[in-house]
Image (cartoon, grey):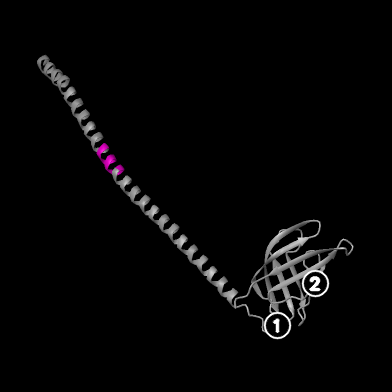
């Protein structure tokens, strides 16, 4: 009986390390398997994330390119529309009174008494008996004049800044000469605008 107990005791002591090692080995194997699965899942997740990021990036690029194209088309359409609107402005259909002064080839000087003298160019619009003179002056006034002309070439126009009348007191306007004056300093002196041009033969 004692011999049996001794043998049982020895078997129990010997089997416990073996079982412990088996359990430890199984646990390690499971841990390795879990690690493998986790690594594969992480790899697959990264691949899917990269694909989604590429897709999102491509979408953003197409959105930017598409927006740029749309903007360019819009600007081109606006410019084309503006040009069409300008070209539809009707020309003057009234007969010109006096010499024809229309043109953008006028040049001369603006002399404001006791202020300054400045070289200028001018654009003149002439329709019927109405005349508009626009100069490049940067002085206090003398930039724009509007008024009428007679068949003789005599003009009376007013400065749109001061509303003072300027007239052709020293001779009528011709197709190559415009000289208008305003009496200042208690009618003792003159402001003057003299414009000239050369017409092609």
Viewer-closest of 94 and 34: 94
From the viewer's perspective, is 56 left or right of 23? right
Q: Is residue 147 magenta?
A: no
Position of residue 151 measured from the top left corner of the image (x, y, whole percent): 76, 83
The answer to whether residue 165 is visible is yes
Viewer-closest of 33 and 72: 72
Q: Which residues are magenta?
A: 35-42
Q: Which mark is residue 62?
A: none
Q: Is residue 122 above or below residue 34?
A: below
Q: Is residue 58 above or below residue 162?
A: above
Quadrant including the C terminus: bottom right
Task: Say which residue label 2 marks.
Answer: 170
Label 2 packing within 10 angstroms: few (<14), some (14-19), many (20+): few
Q: Identify the secondary structure beneath mark 1.
A: loop
Task: Say which residue label 1 marks.
Answer: 96
Gap in Å between the C-alphas at discs 1 and 2?
Answer: 22 Å
Quadrant including the N terminus: top left
């Amino acid at each position: 009986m004692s011999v049996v107990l001794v043998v049982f005791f020895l078997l129990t002591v010997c089997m416990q390390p073996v079982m412990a090692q088996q359990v430890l080995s199984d646990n390690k194997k499971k841990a390795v398997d879990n690690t493998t699965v986790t690594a594969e899942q992480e790899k697959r997740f990264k691949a899917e994330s990269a694909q989604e990021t590429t897709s999102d990036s491509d979408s953003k690029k197409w959105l930017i390119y598409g927006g740029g194209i749309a903007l360019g088309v819009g600007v081109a359409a606006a410019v084309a529309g503006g040009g069409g609107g300008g070209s539809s402005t009707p020309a003057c259909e009234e007969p010109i009174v006096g010499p024809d002064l229309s043109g953008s080839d006028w040049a001369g000087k603006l002399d404001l008494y006791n202020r300054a003298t400045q070289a200028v160019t001018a654009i003149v619009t002439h329709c019927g008996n109405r005349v508009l003179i626009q100069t490049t002056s940067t002085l206090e006034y003398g930039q724009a004049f509007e008024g009428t002309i007679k068949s003789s070439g005599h003009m009376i126009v007013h400065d749109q800044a001061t509303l003072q009348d300027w007239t052709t007191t020293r001779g009528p306007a011709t197709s190559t000469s415009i000289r208008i004056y305003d009496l200042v300093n208690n009618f003792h002196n003159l402001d003057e605008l003299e414009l000239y041009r050369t017409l092609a033969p």
